[in-house]
Amino acid sequence: MSAQIGVTGLAVMGANLARNLARNGYTVALHNRSVAKTDALLAAHGDEGDFIRTETMAELVESLEKPRRVLIMVKAGGPVDSVIDALVPLMEPGDIIIDGGNSNFQDTRRREADLARKDLHFVGVGVSGGEEGALLGPSIMPGGSKESYDALGPLLEKISAKVDGQPCCAWIGTDGAGHFVKMVHNGIEYADMQVIGEAYDLLRSAAGIEPAAQSEIFAKWNEGQLASFLIEITAEVLGHVDAKTGKPLVDVIVDSAGQKGTGRWTVQSGLDLGSPISAIAESVFARGLSSQRGQRAIAQDVLAGHELPVELGADFVEDVRQALYASKLISYAQGIDMLQSAAVEYNWDLKLDEIASLWRGGCIIRAELLKDITKAYAADEKPANLLFAPAFAAEIAQVLPAWRRVVSAAVQLGIPVPVFSSSLAYYDGLRRKRLPAALTQGLRDLFGAHTYNRVDVGGTFHTQWSGDKSEVSAVDTH
Ligand code: NBP
């Protein structure tokens, strides 16, 4: 018996993907650095399908049909390079090495180029859905060559989540495109969670609605425009009572949010691309601020508040819902805009409708909204920005007054809403006819002779600030 695919790295994600593949009828060769994990998986789930137990890389490679497919599911970073180094001498031209971990897309680009020189395919695959998704059907974002997708795609599509009968898996683009799209997915996930947190804080701190009652509000919200996995689990977490204290669980959890790095990578990459992904950036910064517990404790005593009284309207809860929806839309619009910039920079032909479509199921940001986003980018005329799609421009117009009221109230009450407010600033910045960037350019020209363009004639100019202040035509030194 030979296996259609091998999996090396059988911690929680690798084990669950291996089980998912076996449950879908594939023979799966299993390998882990320490054999104990392989044996534990076989002991607990060996009856779920056809597995081949291997102890060494050589055994793993020998057990595979050709072209060989080996899925690496080890810790991102150095361990992936070690496993690749061990595999390469054992593989033959045309074989496929797949990295399904959360690798940085730049590492994936480097590895793909290295292996292409050895006639091996390297496919970086973004996998979203956590432990449960890996087992029951994740959202899968494969990069690498089109040729490798022909050999690998059918397996990945089979084990992926399905929405309306469509697999949540499609070839994203060459080299690191899959890992890049997964990274941006995670960035949007950060923003999605932050806007939920801001809504919760406003309902609690401004309107005095306790977690149990909020659980019902979020459950109701999950039936409408906001329907999504994250809103659904927010209702669950807010409704959960701590068995030890009888308090809402959310009140006994330390208010310091961790991060594993994909949000930070998204922001770093957004800065490199010049993409205004303020919602994602503010979400990462909000987690950073939450973790500065020492400074936050000192601030309790030394920093004034001077909150101002606010008359909350009778529809405050609905206002917050609308502000949450608007801010969520902005984070998707910014994330997708970043994908467009990356497509140009890295020469990827990203199909935004397919990407939105495969985020509809299996992944953490799965949401009803993604169906409309898919439609917007499947249209003949693709919007330059998601917000320009007629359906979304109309929706934003509808929720805009509530969004402004909520941000104003939050500012007056001293409740931090970094993503609600920065998203509104992004929206207003985008639609503003004249931005103060003109003044910025004037200042740059004065202190650094950085030059400017004029609104009335073409060319690049410099004012001789330290001389007679006359304007001269200049070579662009931006
Ligand atoms: P971990 O990230 O915890 O990695 C543990 C695995 O890596 C074990 O199999 C371990 O072998 C192996 N390993 C390490 Br550590 N160093 C190694 C080396 N030098 N050579 C060979 N093997 C090595 O596993 P995980 O939590 O299952 O995650 C796997 C990947 O999936 C990661 O990239 C992670 O970021 C990603 N992930 C994705 C999601 C998602 O929702 N998509 C969720 C969680 C994780 P050992 O057993 O011998 O120590």
Image (cartoon, rainbow, N blue to C red):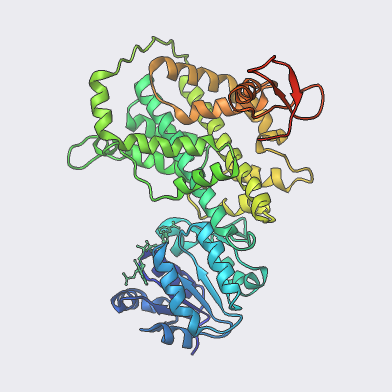
Residue 66 seen in render? yes
In-image side of 52 versus 40 (left or right): right
Please determine whether, in this image, residue 400 is positioned above or below residue 138. above
Which residue occupies 69% across, 14% down?
A: 468
Residue 212, quarter of the rendered image: top left
- Residue drawn at point x = 43 percent, y = 86 percent: 58
As drawn, the residue found furthest toward the left would be 244
Q: Please determine whether, in this image, residue 36 is positioned above or below residue 312.
A: below
Looking at the image, the residue that sits furthest to the right is 457
Q: How many marks?
A: 0
State the image quarter where residue 436 is shown.
top right
Quadrant containing ligand 1 reads bottom left
Q: Position of residue 349 (x, y in %)?
A: 70, 56
Query: Residue 50, how many percent across, how many down?
Result: 45, 81
Q: Is 110 left or right of 473, judged from the image as shown?
A: left
In the current view of this chain or complex, which residue is farthest to the bottom? 1
**The one of 404 and 45 positioned closer to us in this rendering:** 404
Which of the image's four quarters has the C terminus?
A: top right
Residue lying at 51% horizontally and 55% vertically, measured from the top left: 362
Residue 277 lies, in percent from the top left, at: 55, 38
Residue 158 visible to an observer of this rendering: no
Residue drawn at x 67%, y 35% is 477
How far across and down, in percent of the image, does residue 234 sit? 40, 40
